[in-house]
Image (cartoon, rainbow, N blue to C red):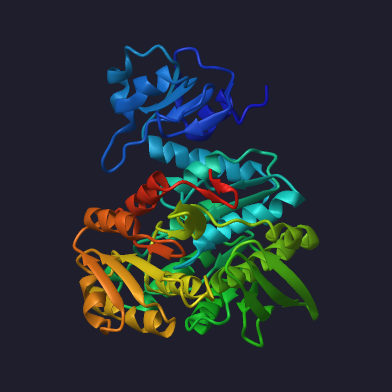
Amino acid sequence: MSWLWTTDEMIAAMAGRPFGTPPEGITGISIDSRSIGPGEAFFAIKGDRVDGHDYASMAMANGAALLVVSEARLPAMGRLTVPMIVVEDVLAALAKLGLAARARTEAKIIAVTGSVGKTTTKEMLRHVLTPSGKVHASVASFNNHWGVPLTLARMPEDTDFGIFEVGMNHPDEIRPLVKMVQPHVAIITTIAAAHLGNFKSIKEIATAKAEIFEGIVPGGHAILNRDSDQFNFLDRAAQAAGVENIHTFGQHPKADFRLAEFNGSEENSALWLTLGGETFEIAIGAPGRHIAENALAVLGAVTLVGADLDKAIEALSTLQPEKGRGKRHKLSVGGSYFTLIDESYNANPASMRAAISLLAASSSDSRTRRIAVLGDMLEMGDHSHKVHADLAGPLLAAGIEHVWLAGPEMAALRDSLPDSVHVEYRENTEDLVAFILDSVAPGDVLMVKSSLGTGFGKIVAGLLDKFAAFSETGPN
């Protein structure tokens, strides 16, 4: 049996003590009692809303081979027959196990942060590095104080490439996480107005993102967006943190990984990358200039970790957008179809603009209704009214004539759009769902974009539930 961890290794790493007769080892780690698999260890983490100890019996029923529980909650676990490792603090123990995982591996480690595109870039790295070796990467957006140590602790010892997304909502959140990850390469995709409610300025956001430099290993590399307004600041911050190798990507003439040319279409993209005096023609199986720009950083990282660049370039041609991050659906309606672009996972001003550009490029047919379905951008604080109203400019520049909105903050955009734009506004998501389900028509292209907390995923789910997938031979 190939164990992720032997129990003895876990006990030593976490300074825990066994309770009952533990198994020889475990095959995986979970913090979700609903999805745990047989042979895995369940870490009973206490979160802001729920305490994992309350779900220990469910974890046992679903096949957990081992529980990791806190000393304080052990008396309440007495009726459970599954073996346990008892620790003072479960989340702290998970972090210790993550550090042990980092210490035992010889993998090349890449960390990704930025205001926009973290998860897409992480998934792109996973996709293009897979032909070169065994890849371990964070699931979904596991990029916070529990997601990063969990991803580390899940990393097999024989991993060749480890990819970690590192996020933040406040200052001093990236610093402890990146010091756990200890990347050989750190990428900052871009700096933009995200979580503005927690920061006074873009410069403060850049300062928080720059914390990633503090964890880069000696001799390691930083990859920065040369086109970003914050580039000079980040470059100085990387030098001040002692980063020995600083590389750049973008369209800027001085970029190390330079976008020489871009040609986008509705379904995919082509770009020409200049690297080390050589130009590469690259096909990407996903549309959007923002995807192409982050592909530059990805291919730069591929070269820096010693992976096969040719295989990585070839893999980009089969890249597919993720659910909630640009995934496209053709759905049957009225004997034909409409197109749904699912950008519903999250939103800030920069990603909104990128999604609007994606919608603008989605059809050259003047009869097509290109419809921006937009919801509130959360965590904008005192800037909220302005950043929502300011979306009128990109929409008008892109020639978007149909805008369907929901949410109290989107009232600012509604009031900023001229009469030439067909605007539908609803105060809440549920009312907009009902309108959309009754209003889509053949040939429409709908792009759905909002912050996750607004529930715009209900719009996507409603459309997928009501309308069948379309094929040339009829509905599937």
Judge from the rendering whether residue 131 lies leftward or rightward of residue 358; answer left or right. right
Q: Residue at x 57, y 40 (%)?
A: 100
Q: Nearer the viewer, residue 331 or 105?
A: 331
Up-down relation of residue 314 to residue 101 (above or below): below
Q: Position of residue 315 (x, y in %)?
A: 72, 57
Q: Residue at x 43, y 15 (%)?
A: 82
Q: Visible in this render: residue 12?
A: yes
Which quarter shows the N terminus? top right
Total labels: the figure holds 0
Q: Position of residue 141 (x, y in %)?
A: 46, 51
Q: Residue at x 48, y 42 (%)?
A: 150
Judge from the rendering whether residue 300 lies leftward or rightward of residue 407; answer left or right. right
Up-down relation of residue 86 to residue 117 (above or below): above
- Rendered image quadrant of residue 268: bottom right
- Rendered image quadrant of residue 226: bottom right
Q: Nearer the viewer, residue 441 or 384?
A: 441
Q: Nearer the viewer, residue 427 or 111?
A: 427
Q: Position of residue 16 (x, y in %)?
A: 45, 28
